[in-house]
C-alpha cells in the first residue's frame, strides 16, 4: 500500500506533496530534517490525500497532486483548516 501525502507549512504557506509505502518512517524523516526539500521550512501539518495499491498508480496520482491544479485543490481544501488550527510541530 502506498500513500500520497501533503505537508502544509503554515509559516510560508507552501505545500509539499510526496508518496511513500512507509508513511510513519517518512514523517519522522521530515520532522528530523533529513529531507532536503522540506528541511528548512519550519513546522508542518501532514495529511494523507490518497491511498493506492501499486507504486505505479501512486506515482501517477502524486504527479497530479504536484501539478498546479492539484496544489490549488489542496490549498482550497485544506489550508483554511491549517490556518485555524494550532501548529502541531509536524504530525
Image (cartoon, rainbow, N blue to C red):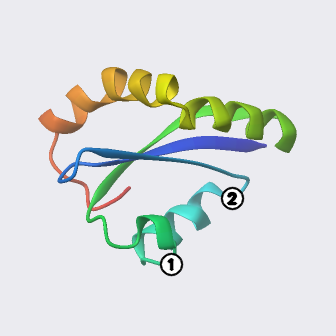
**Quadrant location of residue 47?**
top left
Quarter where residue 74 is shown: top left
Is residue 54 in view from this perspective?
no
Give the side of residue 8 with respect to residue 68, left or right. left
Residue drawn at the location 58% of the way across and 64% of the way down: 26
Please indicate whether residue 26 sits to the left or right of residue 20 in the image: left
Q: Can residue 44 be seen in this view?
A: yes
Instruction: Give the total number of marks visible in the rendering.
Output: 2
Q: Nearer the viewer, residue 73 or 88?
A: 73
Location of residue 71 with respect to 8 vertically, above or below: above
Q: Name the residue under label 2.
A: 22
Q: Name the residue that disc number 1 marks.
A: 34
21 or 73: which is nearer to us? 73
Q: Position of residue 36 (x, y in %)?
A: 49, 73
User: How much space separates mark 2 and mark 1, taking CA atoms?
Assistant: 15 Å
Marks 2/1 in contact by CB < 8 Å: the verdict is: no
Task: Please determine whether, in this image, residue 44 is positioned above or below residue 56.
Answer: below
In the rendering, at what x and y percent does residue 1 appear?
A: 79, 43
The structure residue drawn at horizontal position 32% and vertical position 46%, both measured from the top left corner, is 14
> Which x, y percent locates residue 25?
60, 67
Identify the residue at horizontal 19%, vertical 52% (top origin): 87
Tell me: residue 7, above or below residue 78. below
> Left or right: 88 with respect to 47?
left
Query: Which quadrant, please, contains the C terminus?
Result: bottom left
In what element is the residue under mark 2? Answer: loop
Quadrant in the rendering for residue 65: top right
Q: What element carries label 1?
A: loop
Amino acid at each position: 500500500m502506498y500513500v500520497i501525502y501533503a505537508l502544509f507549512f503554515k509559516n510560508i504557506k507552501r505545500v509539499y506533496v510526496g508518496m511513500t509505502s512507509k508513511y510513519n518512517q517518512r514523517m519522522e524523516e521530515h520532522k528530523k530534517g533529513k529531507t532536503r526539500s522540506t528541511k528548512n521550512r519550519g513546522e508542518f501539518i501532514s495529511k494523507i490525500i490518497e491511498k493506492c495499491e501499486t507504486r505505479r498508480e501512486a506515482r501517477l496520482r502524486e504527479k497530479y497532486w504536484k501539478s498546479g491544479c492539484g496544489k490549488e485543490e489542496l490549498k482550497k481544501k485544506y489550508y483554511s483548516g491549517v490556518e485555524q488550527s494550532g501548529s502541531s510541530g509536524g504530525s
